[in-house]
Amino acid sequence: MSEIITALTGTQKVAVVLMNMDHELASVVMKQFSDAEAEVIASEIIQLRKVDAEIAENALTEFHEITRNSSRPGRGGHEFAQGLLEASFGAERAAGVLTRVATSMAGKAFEFLDSAESSDVLNLLEGEMPQTIALVLAHLRREHASAILSGMAPSLRTDVAQCIATMGSAAPEAIRIVTDTLKMGARTVVARETVEVVGGVQPLVEIMNRADAATERALLEALEERDPILAEEVRSRMLTFADIVKLESRDVQQVLRGIDTSVLAIAMKGTSGAVLAVIRANLSERNRDLLDDETKSLGPVRVSQVEDARAEVVRAIRDMEAQGTITVQRGVEEEYVN
């Protein structure tokens, strides 16, 4: 049974008032709030299940809106919040508000794992179904999720990756069961109720983009064997060394300025003529000469060395994109002829 609320914050008082109003009148009041304010209030309405009748009445009195139904416990939940928002803002705008509320609340579900070491999370998830692990990783910080994914056995890692990419909506009750079970294992405090969350290809791509080159390659190969269409979609969204051709010339120059010539020479081993042309065109004459000297002095290079060198360039691109220094075009990739 849900715990009865016996003390309210200011926003919860607003939520209780609206919950006890006539629906039409409540929608008139809701229209006076901005989208940001409506999101916070809707979040409280969704979470408020049972409010002590006396507490609810006090809240109504405080807002000078006592009605004959004021002693009745508030009626809340997702359906009430959705109906109120739709009556206030229309279906389309209400859907946007609820989506942002869902995203915000979903991010809190697994916060208790944020500070845990990846090895500890792996131990905590040991024996769990791939679907459960996918649900958890999809809502952790991408860097944290990537470290955890990299530490898994290859077969499990592929199962989990596929589950993340194909994940649909998770019911609040399912999320509550997962969080409660994990928190019992971790001996942490139970978190607040969350709303539905959604996985998909993009969360998987963001996790893989932060993995090391070996993990990325192995996972893509395993996905290719299991689900070629899914693997191709993941691959098409991932940022790679070859994506340097998608950058504006000035952005390529910024990226190359931070890359050591010896690293760049290794990264260029075996790459396409289009990539070579873009790199050489955006180096100064002096740096082109240095690169040529470095390239000539290179003997056979291990594939892992090439991958590591390319990963360094990709990290530089990702970091600059995250900082807003450069822009990466992620449209349909054009074909290049060597």
Image (cartoon, rainbow, N blue to C red):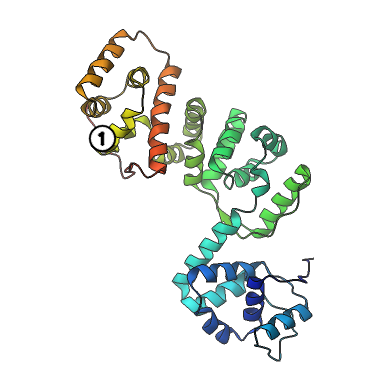
Q: Amino acid at mark 1?
A: Glu
Vertical placement of residue 80 versus 65, above or below? above
Vertical placement of residue 132 versus 120, above or below? below
Vertical placement of residue 174 versus 58, above or below? above
Q: Is residue 81 left or right of residue 122?
A: left
Residue holding disc 1: 335
Q: In terms of image quadrants, where is residue 49?
A: bottom right
Report the quarter where the C terminus lies: top left
Q: Is residue 256 left or right of residue 196?
A: left
Q: Is residue 275 left or right of residue 258?
A: left
Q: How crowded is the residue under tag 1: few (<14 C-alpha within 10 Å), some, or many (20+)?
A: few
Q: Position of residue 122 (x, y in %)?
A: 67, 35
Q: In terms of image quadrants, where is residue 251?
A: top left
Q: Position of residue 134 (x, y in %)?
A: 60, 43
Vertical placement of residue 252 versus 164, above or below? above
Give the residue displayed 61% in from the left and 69% down from the top: 78
Q: Position of residue 87 (x, y in %)?
A: 51, 79
Give the residue displayed 47% in from the left and 76% down from the top: 89
Q: Nearer the viewer, residue 214 or 116?
A: 116
